[in-house]
Amino acid sequence: MPDFDERHGLGSAQLVQLMQWDEATFLRMTEGSAIRRIGHVRWLRNLAIAVGNALRLQPTVTTSEAQALRQAVKAWSTHDSEVVTESVAWAMAV
């Protein structure tokens, strides 16, 4: 069924790639998808939590991947949304 088909390669996207989406990209890439309903800020929160989880499972994440994740999520530490900055602080507290 088309409604359940993968869109825009999201099924194979890397976490660091998804973290590079600005709001316009998020809206474009999630058009027609239920994930769009959460909005960009909650998308960022979810990604920050995913980073924290990935860093806590470091044996499954290479050192270079962990470094890239930390660098990407650290860029959000001054985000306007407290929801995002709190999630970033949690993710970085590894």
Image (cartoon, rainbow, N blue to C red):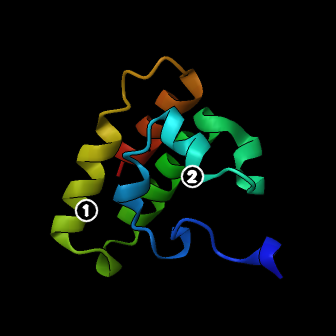
What is the x, y in percent for residue 19?
41, 48
Q: Determine the image quadrant of residue 26.
A: top right
Q: Residue 23 in the image: x percent, y percent?
A: 52, 34
For marks 2 and 1, the one nearer the N-term is: 2
Where disc 2 sits, the SS reads helix
Q: Give me the residue at 55% from left, 75% from top.
A: 11
Q: Relative to residue 34, is residue 27 depicted above or below?
A: above
SS category of the residue bearing label 1: helix
Q: Is residue 90 or residue 43 the one in the foreground? A: 43
Above or below, 45 relative to 53: above
The mark found on residue 18 in the picture is: none
Which amino acid, by three-letter code, is at mark 1? Ala
Label 1 Cα neighbours within 10 Å, binned few <14 / some 14-19 / many ≥20: many
The foreground one among 81 and 54 is: 81
Mark drawn on residue 29:
2
The picture quadrant where one finds residue 43 is top right
Residue annotated with mark 1 = 66
What amino acid type is highlighted by mark number 2? Met
- Which corner quadrant holds the N terminus? bottom right
